Image (cartoon, coloured by chain):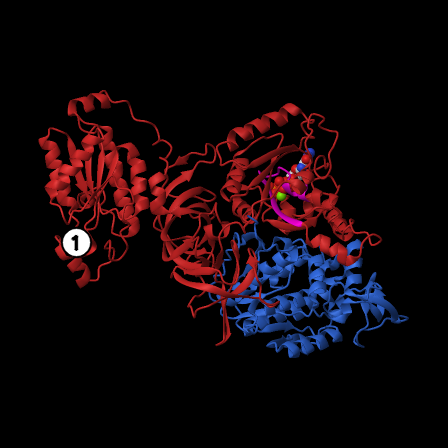
Chain colours: A red, B blue
């Protein structure tokens, strides 16, 4: 049924073409219990003529039995379709409804306000481009209003319309509207910014729903439907790089091997260079095969079968991605979770994780914090209860191939499934590789206060010690002479009457870092804690000599940022691998060969040579005394020694 | 720099989503099956399944639950389609019901539907040990369907519990089940009736001719036009079938499917009529009028 079709002015094919080209907007209604979400959807469906006569008659009949409107048609019953919902007059699970107007098509998810059913609200919200958040004019912004607001924000819904409903009950009092608007703004200001508009409304009577009204002369904005029809839904999933999680390998005979899947992001064309991750195999797209013939271009969210040039082994769970702009591969990721089960989440628990088409066992290593819905502060916690939101570190058996959720929804989202009952326990938004995020994580609330000012100032210390504090990071392969140089540098500084302390990977691992191993993540964390220590030491006016392999340039950059770039010196001991291996002062390389050890820099993974070190020491050619002299000269030159 | 895009139309996006769901079923279940009811939605679903696995064959069988009261034209269409496309077609009728001579005219639509549809379906699913059945239901069809997940969990007794549905986020389907449990998957969840007809029209999908208007013998009962498809329909005294130009908006068992008077003999005409229609497609379905919430009750019992 479409009242906008007029057989006298256009043919059916013209109409269908026009209809086909309309933009689709997926939105949800959310907000606290009884704020009028279902009534609003019923009203929208009714006023856009999306209801058939027999459906309306059925609602009128049911209203006599269940309705809240004294026998009048209760439009909420158009969406509250379950028996228990009708009996209790509440929404329990999300209902999906479809309607269209002259300009757009809409899929609307009417979600429950009741806190108990927050998971169903999240279900409805996960695929939406816009949220309509209702607030009851009588009650104002409640905990549940805030919770829904936060969930839509976490899920990255880019637009929000705040509908201040039941204005009829407060006599369309502008001050009520203004106060709620101000309250809401004060809260949402603390969330990442997004387009946010307000509209006063009576869902029950239809004021400012599908049409404007005279009721609020003080409001000169558009009605809700006009907002829905005109708000820009710009984000295009084809603007981000190509990602295709392999869903099903189509292999009818030896001549055809197609990697069937849905493009989650970007576009692809025959001839494009791609990589299959996590294996890292490179290839070229030779065909984009579909039932309707090969395509010259395909973009998200199309389902296709990709044929590659080479005989490459890829299976469900793998991801085919653009070679020149690849996602991150890691088995430890940090994610924000919405916990959706009565049994609280405990650290250490194991789950089945689904991400893209990958299904893998995983473990929650740590719960970093919980988000306080009222204050939006991050607070320490031991677990996450039903409907709570928190940040966790996950460790997966198979590495994940991901983009941060805010970049690509389709490759940044995950769910956790209970291993025994198979219930969906949590929805997760990946923020990044855990080791990366730890460097920049903000302190928890309560821990973020500054300590008391000391009674001895930094200037006083600098004066007494005759130095400005600095951290000298000695980086280089194992066996490149870092430790020897560090020891001698410390001695030399002491002999000059300066105050310095020294540590390296081995000393750190004796105590502070004894929980860390030698994976890339743990190495990064080892260095982070060392650098946090260096920072404390520097803050007290003391020089810090730190000898670490620190093989990643990104990690060294993070270290500089942490300690402070103007008091951080990178000294590269650039003895080549062959030299270090032949010298092998600690027997590490021999050991590595004999027991095929993992995690040896330069062997199991590359050492990334610093591009612009403050000093480069050919430590295989000059003796340690000379190295120390050069470092001291540099420190003098930069004004650290007086 | 010009931005190159692959702009998808609305139907192309729906198609992409459905194909992805169908592939997901094939990839993550041991023994999937696709329900084939011969109607318009099944025809679209079958078409999408062919697209999903092209150039390979559809990797699962089709299941038709035959109540023995389907329109004859439907059965002929089914057999022709299965042959032309080389489908692995399973047809099941409830033997107990057949032995008892179940008839909607004699036993009433409620008992008949339970025995010949719900029980028959459960028998067939259990016998085939199918762990996932793909169905063509759409959310816009009925108010309890509007609430159902795309991957909808069923317990050991094939029951749906609308109050404890699993959360379903993004397109991260949870397809995990325990022994004896199963899933019903609905790739057409987000399609509307208009989408289905438009797609049939644009993709030139073959449908049972009963969807198009033609002169057919009908009798009127309780305001519903019932087609006299064979002589099992007991005519009441003075009741004589009339030839009327009619078509069907939904197809099922002929005694339970109401016809609408219409002259729309082409798909374009059918769609045109649909755009001005004032009643829903379900109105012609006798079984939906057994009471408010009857669909939900049937689904809880295992009905599709
Ligand atoms: N006066 C007045 N009443 C309203 C308005 N909107 C909704 N109501 C009434 O508020 C009650 C709750 O409405 P619903 O639409 O069921 O609320 P809901 O937000 O969907 O509730 P849940 O889904 O259970 O969270 C009903 O009695 C409605 O008739 C309004 O604008 N004005
Ligand atoms: Mg509601």
User: Which quadrant, please, contains the C terminus of chain A?
Assistant: top left
**Residue A177 vertical placement versus A574 (above, below):** above
Disc 1 element: helix
The one nearer the camera, B125 or A148, is: A148
Q: Residue under label 1, please give it.
A: A580
The one nearer the camera, A12 or A494, is: A494
Tell me, yes or no, if residue B159 can be seen here: yes
Q: Position of residue B99 (x, y in %)?
A: 67, 78
Q: Residue at x 45, y 42 (%)?
A: A389
B243 with respect to A528 (left or right): right
Tell me, yes or no, if residue A564 can be seen here: no
**Residue A112 vertical placement versus A354 (above, below):** above
Q: Residue at x 69, y 39 (%)?
A: A226
**Residue A463 vertical placement versus B112 (above, below):** above
* Residue bounds of the magenta highlight: A23-41
The one nearer the camera, A323 or A367, is: A323
Q: Position of residue B13 (x, y in %)?
A: 61, 56
A171 with respect to A234 (left or right): right
Displayed-image quarter of ligand 2 = top right
The one nearer the camera, A51 or A452, is: A452
Question: Within the image, what quadrant is residue A559 found in?
Answer: top left
């Amino acid at each position: 049924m479409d009242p906008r079709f007029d057989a006298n002015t256009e043919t059916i094919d013209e109409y269908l073409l026009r209809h086909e080209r309309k933009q689709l907007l997926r939105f949800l209604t959310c907000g606290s219990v009884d704020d009028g979400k279902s009534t609003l959807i019923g009203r929208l469906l009714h006023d856009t003529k999306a209801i058939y006569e027999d459906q309306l008659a059925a609602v009128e009949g049911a209203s006599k039995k269940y309705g809240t409107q004294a026998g009048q048609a209760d439009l909420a019953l158009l969406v509250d379709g379950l028996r228990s919902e009708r009996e209790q007059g509440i929404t329990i699970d999300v209902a999906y409804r479809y309607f269209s107007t002259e300009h757009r098509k809409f899929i609307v998810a009417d979600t429950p306000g009741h806190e108990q059913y927050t998971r169903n609200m999240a279900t409805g919200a996960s695929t939406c481009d816009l949220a309509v958040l209702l607030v009851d004019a009588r009650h104002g912004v409640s905990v549940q209003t805030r919770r829904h607001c936060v969930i839509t924000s976490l899920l990255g819904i880019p637009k929000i319309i705040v509908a201040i409903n039941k204005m009829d009950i407060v006599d369309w009092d502008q001050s009520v509207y203004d106060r709620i608007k101000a309250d809401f703004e004060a809260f949402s200001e603390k969330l990442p910014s997004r387009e946010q508009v307000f509209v006063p409304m009576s869902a029950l009577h239809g004021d400012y729903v599908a049409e404007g009204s005279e009721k609020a002369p003080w409001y000169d904005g558009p009605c809700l439907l006009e907002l829905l029809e005109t708000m820009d839904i710009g984000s295009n999933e084809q603007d981000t790089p190509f990602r295709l999680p392999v869903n099903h390998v189509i292999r009818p005979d030896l001549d055809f091997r197609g990697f069937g899947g849905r493009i989650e992001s970007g576009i692809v064309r025959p001839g494009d260079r791609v990589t299959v991750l996590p294996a890292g195999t490179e290839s070229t797209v030779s065909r984009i095969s579909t039932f309707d013939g090969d395509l010259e271009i395909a973009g998200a969210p199309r389902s296709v079968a990709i044929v590659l040039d080479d005989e490459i082994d890829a299976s469900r769970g793998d991801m085919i991605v653009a070679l020149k702009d690849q996602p991150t591969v890691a088995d430890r990721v940090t994610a924000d979770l919405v916990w959706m089960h009565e049994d609280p989440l405990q650290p250490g628990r194991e789950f089945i994780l689904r991400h893209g088409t990958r299904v893998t066992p995983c473990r929650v290593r740590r719960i970093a914090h919980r988000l306080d819905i009222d204050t939006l502060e991050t607070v320490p916690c031991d677990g996450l209860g039903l409907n709570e939101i928190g940040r966790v570190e996950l460790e997966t058996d198979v590495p994940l191939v991901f983009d941060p959720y805010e970049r690509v929804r389709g490759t940044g989202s995950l769910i956790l499934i209970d291993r025994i009952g198979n219930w969906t326990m949590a929805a997760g938004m990946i923020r990044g590789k855990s080791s990366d995020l730890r460097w920049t994580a903000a302190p928890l609330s309560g821990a973020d206060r500054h300590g008391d000012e000391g009674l001895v100032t930094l200037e006083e210390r600098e004066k007494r010690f005759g130095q400005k504090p600095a951290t000298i990071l000695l980086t280089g392969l194992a066996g490149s002479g870092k430790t020897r140089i560090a020891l001698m540098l410390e001695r030399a500084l002491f002999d000059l009457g300066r105050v310095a302390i020294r540590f390296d990977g081995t000393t750190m691992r004796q105590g502070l870092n004894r929980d860390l191993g030698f994976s890339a993540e743990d190495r990064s964390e080892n260095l982070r804690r060392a650098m946090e220590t260096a920072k404390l030491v520097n803050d007290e006016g003391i020089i810090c000599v730190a000898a670490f392999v620190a093989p990643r340039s990104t990690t060294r950059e993070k270290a500089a940022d942490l300690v402070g770039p103007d008091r951080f010196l990178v000294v590269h001991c650039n003895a080549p691998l062959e030299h270090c291996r032949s010298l092998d002062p600690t027997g590490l390389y021999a050991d590595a060969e004999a027991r095929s050890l993992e995690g040896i820099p330069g062997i199991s993974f590359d050492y990334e040579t610093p591009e612009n070190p403050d000093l480069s020491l050919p430590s295989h050619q000059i003796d340690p005394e000379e190295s120390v002299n050069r470092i001291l000269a540099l420190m003098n030159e930069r004004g650290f020694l007086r | 720099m010009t931005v190159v895009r692959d702009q998808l139309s609305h139907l192309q996006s729906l198609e992409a989503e459905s194909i992805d769901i169908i592939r997901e079923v094939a990839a993550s279940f041991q023994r999937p099956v696709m329900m084939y009811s011969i109607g318009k939605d099944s025809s679209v679903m079958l078409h999408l399944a062919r697209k999903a696995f092209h150039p390979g064959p559809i990797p699962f069988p089709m299941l038709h639950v035959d109540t023995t009261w389907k329109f004859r034209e439907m059965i002929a269409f089914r057999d022709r389609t299965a042959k032309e496309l080389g489908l692995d077609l399973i047809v099941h009728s409830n033997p107990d019901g057949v032995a008892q001579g179940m008839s909607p005219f004699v036993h009433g639509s409620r008992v008949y539907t339970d025995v010949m549809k719900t029980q028959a379906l459960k028998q067939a699913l259990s016998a085939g040990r199918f762990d996932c059945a793909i169905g063509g239901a759409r959310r816009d069809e009925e108010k309890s369907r509007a609430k159902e997940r795309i991957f909808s969990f069923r317990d050991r007794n094939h029951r749906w519990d609308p109050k404890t549905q699993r959360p379903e986020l993004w397109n991260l389907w949870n397809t995990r089940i325990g022994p004896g449990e199963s899933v019903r998957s609905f790739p057409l969840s987000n399609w509307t009736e208009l989408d289905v007809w438009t797609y049939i029209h644009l993709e030139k999908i073959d449908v049972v001719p009963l969807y198009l208007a033609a002169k057919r013998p009908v009798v009127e009962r309780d305001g519903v036009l019932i087609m006299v498809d064979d002589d099992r329909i007991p005519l009441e005294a003075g009741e004589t079938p009339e030839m009327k130009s009619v078509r069907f908006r939904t197809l099922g068992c002929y005694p339970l499917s109401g016809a609408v008077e219409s002259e729309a003999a082409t798909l374009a005409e059918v769609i045109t009529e649909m755009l001005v229609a004032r009643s829903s497609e379900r109105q012609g379905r006798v079984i939906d009028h057994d009471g408010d919430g009857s669909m939900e009750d049937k689904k809880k019992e295992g009905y599709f």
